Image: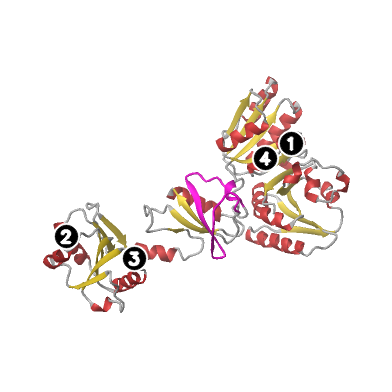
Amino acid sequence: MKNILVILDGIVSKKLLSRMVDSNVVNNMYDVIYMDSSILCDEKPENFTFYKFDPTSFSKLYTVLTKVNHTEVLIVLNSKEEIQSVIKNIRNYKKNLQITIYNNWEITLSEDPYVNNYNGIEVLANGLLEKLPNVPIVAQNIGLRQGEIMELRIPFGSSYAYRYVGSIEQKDWKIFGLYRNDKLLSIKPSLVLKPNDIILMIGNPNVLMQVYATITKTQGQFPRPFGENLYLYFDLYLQTDKEVINCAKETRDLHRKLKNDKLVIKITRPTNNQVLKQIYAIFKKLDNVEIELDYHNIGFNKILCDDVKRFNIGMIILSHTLLRNKESTKKILDLKLPLYKLGIEPISRVNQSVVLLNQSTHYEQISPLVFDISNQLKTKVTVFDSDPIEDKTQDVIIEHFENLGKIFNTPIKTIRNNKNPIKELQQLQNIIQILPLRDDMFETRLFKFFNTDSDLLSYDINKFNQIFIPIIEE
């Protein structure tokens, strides 16, 4: 049981006392000192004791202070002079009693470490500011009161929409709550963030403001939220010298276009010194490139698992040669990271980002990143709908892409016909295809000629560059 002394006067006090009574904590005993009976409520709970007198009188205040051992004092009065006089009276009785004041006059009490100072104008301004759109809501009266707790609504078009919570790098901050359709959901790595979700975050206030800016920004974030850096993997034993040099040049050009922080290059089984010299020469003019050699041949999966966290990888870059061995590269699925497959056509000539619609739920998940990537690569967006059975669900996903195009201020081109989509795709030039990363892409497929899944058939094309985005497969 805690004994709390409350000293009240004025219109703010009337509202405060009403709230205290409505949310009464029975484990607290309240001694309430007031001067104007108009602030009182009709209801007077048993754990509230009321005293009517002027608290600037030390003798009268002393009587209440000595009645019980108060643990805290809350003061809300009408003038600066009254508050200062009451604090002085309390300090004449007890030097270290915790006091909280409602300060509407910029009273400075920095010399008293036991006074919590709530600036009324600042609280009001913050409350009004948080009602504006695109403004973060921070907890003003919780924790250290420095903004280390924040509430944020996921906007449409955010790069964080349709992302696993587990796939989001959370360093010096953490998502600890999520509201969807007015219901609180349990946070787990497999939970997917969706537009209009309200998330609760805790962490370093400066980091939270950076996270807020990233989540609410709709363009130029990729490879975030997966990570900050690109990761190029070479195996000089499996790849030809020509392929390695070409992949290095293509990745250099990609690195210049995307807004990643750093490019990490891992070279395993580096047996050819001449090729190594050429790789170093290709990247020598770039500062934000780190090249690391692996002489131990510990295997692709072990290397990748060790490097993902160490380098904060946001996207893995592999040649189509390495991806032929589906069994050894299948570990990528567990990492829930985007995969960039280097094609034969050069990235420097790419002028079109192509989406070949298949399962609508998968393409809804990757849609914000399609526009983010296209914005960074400065390419047009083309959506192919080759649906001979005229499935109406395709109309919904096309409308979804068109709406996102408006949000990103990026016009899209829609091509609708019932021709063979793969043949149509193979006739295109200078494109990059963006599609979902699915488990069955890494499975051995017999009788390929009878397969009609455009995602799986696209995976087998090596002509152009492709980006595969992790999804939730239901």
For residue 313, above or below residue 77 = above
Secondary element under disc 4, as helix, strand or loop, is helix
Q: Which residues are magenta?
A: 163-191
Residue at label 3?
A: 25
The label shown at residue 332 is 4
- Foreground residue, 470 or 289? 470
- In the picture, measured across the screen, residue 253 lies left or right of residue 149, that is right
Q: In whole angstroms, how far apart are the C-alphas of marks 2 and 1?
A: 76 Å
The label shown at residue 192 is none
The label shown at residue 327 is 1
The amino acid type found where label 3 is placed reads Val
The amino acid type found where label 2 is placed reads Lys
Q: Residue at x 22, y 60 (%)?
A: 70
Q: Earlier in the sequence, mark 4 or mark 3?
A: 3
- Foreground residue, 33 or 124? 33
The amino acid type found where label 4 is placed reads Ile
- In the picture, measured across the screen, residue 395 lies left or right of residue 15, that is right
Q: Residue at x 60, y 44 (%)?
A: 259
For residue 42, above or below residue 160 = below
Residue at label 2?
A: 88
Answer yes or no: is residue 233 visible: yes
Q: Earlier in the sequence, mark 2 or mark 4?
A: 2
Q: Earlier in the sequence, mark 2 or mark 1?
A: 2
Colouring: secondary structure
Secondary element under disc 3, as helix, strand or loop, is loop
In the rendered image, residue 141, in percent from the top left (x then y), is placed at: 37, 59
Q: Earlier in the sequence, mark 3 or mark 2?
A: 3
Q: In whole angstroms, how far apart are the C-alphas of marks 4 and 1?
A: 10 Å
Secondary element under disc 1, as helix, strand or loop, is helix
Which tag is nearer the camera, tag 1 or tag 3? 3
Secondary element under disc 2, as helix, strand or loop, is helix
